[in-house]
Amino acid sequence: MITALQNFFLKHNKWLFGSLLIVIIVTFVLTIGPQSFFGSNSSGRMDTINYYGYDLTSDQDRRAMSYTAEISAILHPEMQLSQQQLTDYAYLRVAGLGIAQQLGVPDPTADQLSKFVETLMIFADPTTGEFSADSYNRMLSLLQINGQFSRDGIARTMREDYVIDQVLDVLAGPDYSLPFELKQAYIDQGTKYTISLAHFDYASFSPEMSPTDEALLQYFNENPSRYEVPETLTVDALNFKASAYLGSVNMPNEGELELYFSTNRFRYQLAPTASEGAEAVPTPEVTLADVRDQVVGDWNLDQARRTAAQKAQEFSLSLYQNKIVIDSPEYVSLIKSSNAAATVVPRYSRTNPPVTTGLPGELLNSMWIYANNSSRYFSDAAQTSDGAVVLVKRGLTVARMPEFTEVKTLVQQDFEATEKRRLFAEKGKELQETLNTRLGSENFPQIAESLKMTTEDLEQFGGINVPEQLQQADMWDQTMSLDKGLASVMVINGNKGTFSYMAEKIVPEVDTNSEEYKTFVDQRMGVLDNAMGWARLREIKDNSVAALLGTADVPQQ
């Protein structure tokens, strides 16, 4: 959720980001919590693991790491960190601060911190893009509004982010960018494009094909993995249905019924009703007395499901402990006494388990563990929507290579599909040549329509706002270098091939001494340096964690 919000607000309505920041904060608090980053405490079972001054076995230290990481992620929406990425970000920040201590990077002065804070996008005025004191104060208030984050904690996070920023500058190393690369990047970003597209439909492309038996046999021999018949497994499902145990369920006493109703009250409340054109009228709250029979039925069914699960576990355990042979009298007797109903599961391979049986996919896949096991033929018990189930192995067929005649029809289908794809690409080359030949005297849409293609005109855009249509496959790579008045090669994507036509291309003039160009270079270098710094910090973090957690004798920092 947080990534989607960041994308939307940063691109369209930055001013809304501030007003909805509280939603993000609440989401963090409710879904992550103070201990969500690093799991449960295991300090009672592990020695101290010192990670740049933080003990990873300590709940308190892990909470401290997560606390500032959450604040920093909110203060840097441009990083677009998802909730799943926050754990990694917390480790990165701690590694950065540890390196800063080793390098002797000092804490910022008040003036340095003030200038750093003024560079943060989150505090910028939406109309001018400049730092706004109002935005700053509003953000601080929002961060503190639910008591999760304190003013001191926010200030400490800002100081730490400043220090980490200095470390990233050091890790980035020297500037290896070449002048011509910067100049080309400036041109690519500032160029204006007007482009039209032509789409050639794959489904309607129907080339004539009459493959010979020799061609099909050759295709069969060159693609044996397509036609190998995989090994398959046959199993029985022993179903322990809740309905089979309803008769053994004791009636609930009043206390049990009251507790069950209170816990599941939402099941029995009625939705508000309204006549046409009128507001919905809330319905009276349902009491246990109103739905007593339904509650009793639901309670009984839940108890029967528990009994079914218990019976299935006892059945599987009995097979194991007593070494009962499949289909022996003991086996048949045990099924009967357990009220289990056997059904045959359709034969399936390792990569294609049946999906219409209602059985857990993990359970079906687990049976392959016992495929070649002569001492065990049954699974563990697993719950289902109507009770529980145990799977029993019945048979295994080995993989084999069929004769060509057995699969000739399938081979022909595959051959023709492959050949159609090849011919489609060949047709694309022909169409591109036709387009570029005729473009000197005709316009692109007319030519495309005469060749039975559909056209699409894109609005003019700059190099940093490439339309989604051109981001498919390698469409933009084939388009951006086109000269005006030319069509690209056909790019195949899904069920169509697409040509792009450069209707107009306005390339900016480059004055390397202008303030605009210098600003661009500074910004680009800042982005590149930052990315390189983070990459090297991540490498240090990964190596540090691996060294700590990958050895028995954990080194102390």
Image (cartoon, rainbow, N blue to C red):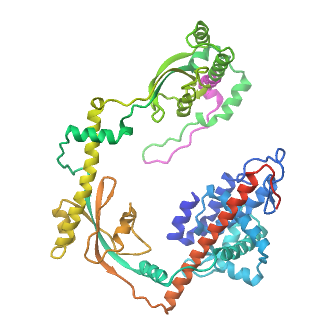
Quadrant where the N terminus is found in the figure = bottom right
Viewer-closest of 390 and 371: 371
Q: Is residue 203 above or below residue 190?
A: above
Quadrant where the C terminus is found in the figure = bottom right
* Residue 513, horizontal then vertical, whole percent: 49, 93
Residue at 44%, 25% (x, y): give it. 347
* Residue 511, horizontal then vertical, whole percent: 45, 91
153 with respect to 409 (left or right): right
Residue at 55%, 25% (x, y): give it. 372
Judge whether residue 429 can be spotted in this image: yes
Residue at 51%, 91% (x, y): give it. 515
Q: Residue furthest bottom?
A: 513
* Residue 158, horizontal then vertical, whole percent: 72, 72
530 with respect to 186 (left or right): right
Question: How would you classify the magenta stretch by its main secondary structure?
Answer: helix
Residue 302 among those drawn in magenta: yes
Q: Which residues are magenta?
A: 277-306
Q: Please identify the quarter of the rendering in which residue 490 is found.
A: bottom left
